[in-house]
Image: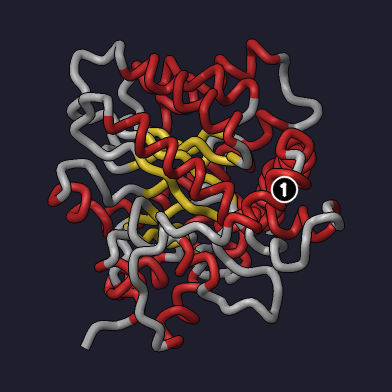
Amino acid sequence: MTSPLKSLISSGTKLWLDSIDPDLVIKNREMGATGATSNPIIVADLLKTGRFDADIRKLSSQPADEATWAITDQLVSQAEKVFMPVWEESAGNDGYVSFELDPLLEDTDAPEHEERVRQYIELGKKWSKNHPNRMIKVPATKAGIAALEDLAAAGVALNVTLIFSERQYTEARDVVWRGAQKLDNLDRFKSVYSIFVSRLDVYTEKNVPTLAPESQGWVGIVNAKRIWAQNKEFWQEKACKLDQEMIFASTGTKKPEDPKWKYVAAFAGSDIETNPPATNDAVEASGKMFEKAIDHMPDQKILHDIDKHVDFEKLEDMLMSEGLAKFADPQKALLSLVKEKIAK
């Protein structure tokens, strides 16, 4: 008898874990996960457990920022080993672990635009070197997008993150494709685009009171499905050996009354879902069997209501502003945590 997560995978979804906890990576690999992703919050939460104090102690002669990146690199590398067989069996189409570039490049006191771009390119090449199944996470900011062409042309596997809107997705995708065309061949070219979902529904509930009650809770799903369709159509025309996919991120529900698998079910059937460990556990315990739903849309009345009342340009501006704070602040907290542990 198949399990809920196995049914999700059978529908056509690649399941990635939103964690690089070594224990959870092994557990979720056994449950069917074929990749993982990391960020400063995930790393900080791991270090707070004290399980990696001995590793930090070995790095204590280094400055705190260097030690922080070293322990991050170590944790991501461990997860890469678990998923390397998937990468090999899929010839590079799956089995990746995402590594986030320095979020402080988007902080308020970060360097000027040109220097940010240069550092994104330099760091992307540095952290991807000798890591065939490592994906470099670059935010869909002005500087991040400006760095994508050079990174794609250098053969770096890319995860463009912090995408909230069609505009961001289209701009990032076109720049990545421009860089990919500079490669000698496209056999190893791989890019994914992380569209955030639940945050959009949180935004509309707070800021779009004119949206009908039956339309609330659908904006994130509709937005992501529309971009998924565009992405599918765009890459079908290109001679790429590997899939250039959407990642459905921020799939954990925010409202207690929503079923934990609300977003998981909505995107079943295609591309990649990065689910938090708790979401995967809840899905597995649900007993629910999943079928392809990625190409199913709500009633036309809901679609019309969303198009009439949601200003996606305003939505992007506000969510990017919030997202960048959530992007940089956790890195500062992680650096502070490592500094404190080294001092002890």
Q: Considering the image in quadrants, where does the C terminus appear?
A: bottom right
Relative to 163, residue 275 above or below: below
Judge left or right: residue 155 versus residue 265. left
Q: Residue furthest front?
A: 301
Question: Residue visible at 28% across and 69% down?
Answer: 32
Where residue 166 sits in the image (x, y, percent)?
Answer: 58, 35
Rendered image quadrant of residue 324: top right
Any part of residue 341 in sight: yes
What amino acid type should be assigned to the residue bearing mark 1? Lys
Q: Nearer the viewer, residue 19 or 70?
A: 19
- Residue at position x 66%, y 51% in the image: 334
- Which residue is located at x 48 percent, y 20 percent? 122
Callout 1: SS: helix
In the image, 316 versus 96, the foreground residue is 316
Relative vertical location of residue 146 with respect to residue 79 in this rendering, above or below: above
Q: Is residue 333 left or right of residue 233?
A: right
Identify the image quadrant of the N terminus.
bottom left
- In the foreground, 286 or 159: 286
Callout 1: few (<14), some (14-19), or many (20+) C-alpha neighbours within 10 Å? some
Residue 339 in view in this figure? no
Q: Residue 71 at x, y = what percent?
A: 49, 49
Left or right: 180 in relation to 209: left
Q: Is residue 138 above or below residue 31?
A: above
- The residue that mark 1 highlights is 326
Q: Quadrant of residue 298?
A: bottom right
